[in-house]
Image: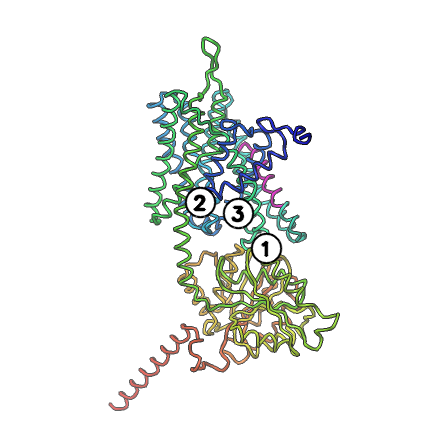
Amino acid sequence: MLILSALDLSLPLRNPVIIFSLVLFIILFAPILFNKIKVPHIIGLILAGVIVGPYGLDLLRRDSSIVLFGTVGLLYIMFLAGLEIDLVEFKKNRTKILFFGLLTFLLPFVLGIMASYYILGYSFLSSMLLASMFSTHTLVSYPIASKYGIAKNRAVTLTIGGTMITDILALLILAGISGVTKEEVSLSFWLQLIISTAAFVSIVFFVFPMITRWFFKHYDDSVSQYIFVLAMVFLASFLAEAAGLEAIIGAFFSGLVLNKFVPHSSPLMNRIDFVGNAIFIPFFLISVGMLVDISVLVNGWGALKVAGVIIFVAILAKYLAAVITQKAFKLTSEEGRLIFGLSSSHAAATLAIILVGYNIIIGETSSGEPIRLLNEDVLNGTILLILVSCAVSSFVVEKASRRLALINESDSSDSDLGEEKILISLAYPDSVNELVDFGLMLKPSKSSVPVYALHVTDDEWSDSNTQVKPEKVLEKAIMHAAATENTIHPLTRYDINISHGIIYTIKEHKITDILIGLHHKSDQNKFFGSTTEELFNKIPETIYIYKPAQPFNTLKRMLVLVSKNAEQEPGFFHWLNKLSIVAISAGIPIWFYATPGTLSEIKSAHQKAKSQISVSYSEFDNWEDFLIFSRELKPNDFFVVITSRKGHISYNNYLEKLPYYLGTYFNSNSFLIVYPKQLDQGINMNNIEQVDPYVIESIADKISTVGKSALNLKRIFKK
């Protein structure tokens, strides 16, 4: 009793331990309870904030700590939106994004001015400020779309881009109106804003990448990398505010910059998602709920009238903008609903505009009461708009995301025949992380393609103390893969011959892709090592020899050199698809060097696949000039060479010099050597199902052509 009496349990709660415990229990149980009744968890967190907030049970006050965590959560949402966006899709759809951004700003803005001026009877200046609030939206429901794995959908990309446009335009109007009321707007004001904005954009998009690349090259500690990412996000947010913009714009821009440095299947990305969704974003949603004052419903018809008009116009305008965008760009109905759901929620920017307007005093009444640019009815109506719009947004996004995820899953299951299996051969503990990361990049995101990790121990030395213990190597691989929410199947094999152990494992598990690290003692005389060379001779499947010189997320470009006639090999489309998957995962462009005929087939394959990556092509057919790539390659390029086994159609004698060139002139670059799938001795008709359909079709065409020529010759001789 003495201990309990020493605790301060008066309301609102002041003990930081009790406050944090209560918030954590809300974050834990609100989603669980609301998922039981099929209500999005976001609504549960907002309603929990209403209940425990100052206008509910008054358990918690919206003090500086709640505001701090809530602000961090909002910036985290915008940062994740920039981090998870598909940059290639973003650039490709920039015209559509501009169209939607202007439409979703102008339509609510015009309708808002008319409703505020003619229905609510506000002045033109007040109507403009209130209408700019209608135009903004906050991506409150973005975590729902991210949870369902559709963050790269074109509808999400359009909405995220439109968010930036609407918020920037609305905040410019806010700055102008605020300056007019203070009589501070002048040419110098706008020049200063333009110059400061240009300086902010230059620093974020040109200086930040250089700092980030340097840091990731020199520090691979997981905690340090996460803290660095957070520091860059909040530095960008601060710079945005210093430039006269909103902090959320800085957070979004930092996400765009860090997008290419944080692979979506990396442990770092997993940590960023986990911390944001577990702590910061729920805090923001609870803080939004604490703003809602339900008592305005019983304070008279004035507040209800304003709230009704604000809610109706804001949601209707966003719905019309989404429908027009869907029809204009021929999107599906689910994508149209997703755009509406994401763009209909109002929170942070909306509240910022209204609070600024509420605090602007333009005069006094005869009794000395202040005349505000936006009165208390507008403030209360906006709070209700936040609650209603977030509820509508959550329900719509939840339903649309679920359906789109099911469509994507069915499409991927149709294309994924379950025949691919990836094997990562691990020999050295210090190269496990790099090989596991690259091996996981060879399979599409969220794919069910199995990945195996193999460590072969020489049977004669299995009991030696100097022998690397397979348990340690495989345990490290499993833990590293688990940090990316991926599963690796460990395989241990004891064999008197290491190469035989790998070969028999490949045959037993029907492996299609084998990833091997370049052995540590490689030199120009014994570049691959006897184990790897034996694999080339006895395994016809695709083999990748990987040598990482720097972290993969610090690379800028993939330069691919393709051997002549590579398009006539059975594994041509397979390795081409794998490189595309890696490029998409890393967010880097590909530059192909090959003969004109090979480039034509590569172009055709990319067009048929509707690839989302940026691809460039250059002709190269003289392997005697191989060393020109020592000038073409930049320090942050990834060099890929598509080679061939001896005796096959894509083999040429200059490939014999490849180990010498790579070991002598390209040792400072990360590179990958690919031995594509090739048949043992020509085409084995007993195993015809293993042959690429393209090859079968080509052979059929050749046979048909030869047959027709023979018939024509026969007719000529008869005549």
- Measured Cα–Cα span from mark 1 to mark 2: 29 Å
Label 2 neighbour load within 10 Å: few <14, some 14-19, many 20+: few
Q: Is residue 139 visible?
A: no
Q: Main secondary structure of the magenta part?
A: helix
Does 588 sit left or right of 307 as displayed?
Answer: right
Colour theme: rainbow
**Amino acid of disc 2:** Lys
- x%, y% of residue 466? 74, 70
Query: Of circles 1 and 2, which is in front?
Result: 2
Q: Say if 566 sits above or below 246 in the image.
A: below
Range drawn in magenta: 228-245
- x%, y% of residue 680? 51, 80
Q: Considering only order in the chain, which callout, 2 or 1, is on the residue closer to the N terminus?
A: 2
Q: Determine whether the residue tagged by mark 1 lies in a helix, strand or loop.
A: loop
**As rendered, which of 699 and 127 lies closer to the eye?**
127
**Amino acid of disc 3:** Leu
Q: Determine whether the residue tagged by mark 2 lies in a helix, strand or loop.
A: helix
Query: Of circles 1 and 3, which is in front?
Result: 1
Query: Of circles 3 and 2, which is in front?
Result: 2
| Furthest residue in direction top, as rendered | 366
Q: At x 53% / y 63%, what residue is drawn?
A: 442
Residue 244, by quadrant, is: top right
**As rendered, which of 344 and 609 lies closer to the eye?**
344
Residue behind mark 3: 83
Q: Determine whether the residue tagged by mark 3 lies in a helix, strand or loop.
A: helix
**As rendered, which of 632 and 58 lies closer to the eye?**
58
Q: At x 55% / y 44%, what residue is drawn?
A: 278
**As rendered, which of 379 and 102 lies closer to the eye?**
379
Q: Is residue 171 visible?
A: yes
| Furthest residue in direction bottom, as rendered | 718
Residue behind mark 1: 483
Cβ–Cβ under 8 Å for marks 3 and 2: no
